[in-house]
Each structure stands twice: as C-alpha cells, then as structure tokens.
Image: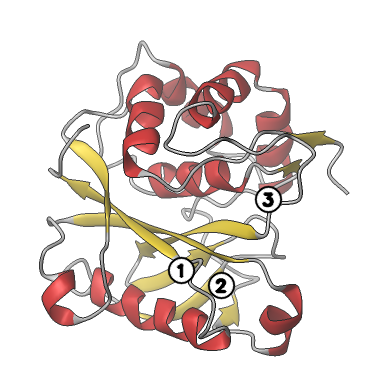
Amino acid sequence: MASQKWIPLESNPQVLNKYVHNLGMDASWNFVDVYGLDPDLLCMVPRPVAAVVLLFPDNTDKISAQNIGDLASDFPSTLYYTKQTIGNACGTVAIVHALANNQEVIPFDASKHFKEFLEKTNLLNPEEKAKFLEEDKLMGAAHGDCASEGDTQAPGQNDKVNSHFIAFVHHNGSLYELDGRKAAPIVHSKTSQETFLEDTAEVVKKFMARDPEDMGFNVMALVQGGEDM
C-alpha cells in the first residue's frame, strides 16, 4: 500500500509538455496525441518517435486474466526501470521511463532538475529509484504543478482513479512495456526505430481487446517536432 499519494495527471499532451519542458527537456521534443491505431493515422505522427505513453482502464480482474507479453526479470541494466511506490504517480513514472530511456537522444538542460535526477538515479536499482522519487521534493512539486493544469477538474489525492499510465520504449532491438507496479519490465517483441510506433500500436490493440467496450484509452507519443502548446 502506497504511503504517499499524489494528485493524478490528466492525459493531455499540453499538460505533459509544460511539465517536461519545465523539468528541462529540450523544446524540440514534445508529446502528441495518437488519434488512432490504423496505418493512415499512425502516418500522421511526427517521426522519430522516442516513446509511447498509454492510459488505459485499470480493471484488475480483466488485466490479470489476460496477461500480455513476457516478464523480463533479467532485463538489461541499461534499460531504465523504476518501481512505483507513490499512489497516483503513474503519470510521472511513465514520463520518467519515457525520458530516461532516451537520454542519449533527447537533450536536457543541465540547469533544470531532471538532468540532475537522471544523474543521481541512473545506477540505482528499481526499488532505490522509487525511493529516490519519493524523497525528491522538486519532482513532487513539478508533478503537483502539472496535475493542477488541464481541461478537467483534477481528482483529489485520495480519490479512487480507475485508469493507469504506462510507457513503451525501444531498447536494444526489443519493445518494452514499463509499468512501475509490475515485478519487472515486460518485453513484447522485436522492434526498430522505424517500426517502433507500429509495433507498439499492435500491443495497444491487445490491451484494448481485453476491454473492448471501455473507451477510456488514450495514446500519446514522444516525438521530435510536434507542436509545443
């Protein structure tokens, strides 16, 4: 049971972009909406795509009954993975996973906090990373500022939230799902920089197939370009 709780983030590229740019991510990179999983809609997403963030309905019974992918308990040490020990922090954990696994590609302002956060957590194990995030007041404050933004009224800290954020990244030729609530990263398939978005879309379709009548899915891509709103 998480002893600390944050206010949930809204699944909104404008909100996330303000968040990550305030943390120091270069303004040439942005989160954008992925409006559909068909090839013609995926073609509209700017390239390259560094990561995909998925918001999905948190229906535990259906999720546990239909696991997708394989637990990568021996995942490479170069894959940045942190556990989630803060309630309602899945949005920030997904963002950390998306950015940290692209720190060799995306520039970060050394005078802003996220660069320091990465330097201090890169070599920690997943549990130590989670503990560091718990105690990092600047990351907590940045999350709180972001959670107060958006188009809808933010839920309260203690409100039950029936959705969950995760991130997908391409690492060493494999497609990984990074969910801080799981025992380890999940590996799905082989992928490449060129096919990463399409390969991730196939995995997201499997998530949607578990709960086909629920419309509470949202997909965002971290891309070079896009529109910084």
Q: CA distance from mark 1 to mark 2?
A: 6 Å
User: Can you identify the residue that label 3 sits on?
Assistant: 83
- The image's colouring method is secondary structure
Percent position of residue 83, x then y: 68, 50
Q: Are marks 2 and 3 in contact (CB under 8 Å)?
A: no
In the rendered image, the vertical position of residue 91 relative to residue 137, given as above or below: below
Q: Earlier in the sequence, mark 1 or mark 2?
A: 1
Q: Are marks 1 and 2 in contact (CB under 8 Å)?
A: yes
- Residue type (three-letter) at the residue carrying disc 2: Ile
On residue 176, the disc is 1
Secondary structure, mark 2, is strand
Can residue 105 be seen? no
- Give the residue drawn at x 46%, y 44%: 95
Q: Residues within 10 Å of mark 2 (few under 14, many from 20)?
A: many
- Residue type (three-letter) at the residue carrying disc 1: Tyr
- Give the residue drawn at x 61%, y 40%: 8
Secondary structure, mark 1, is strand
User: Can you identify the residue that label 2 sits on?
Assistant: 186
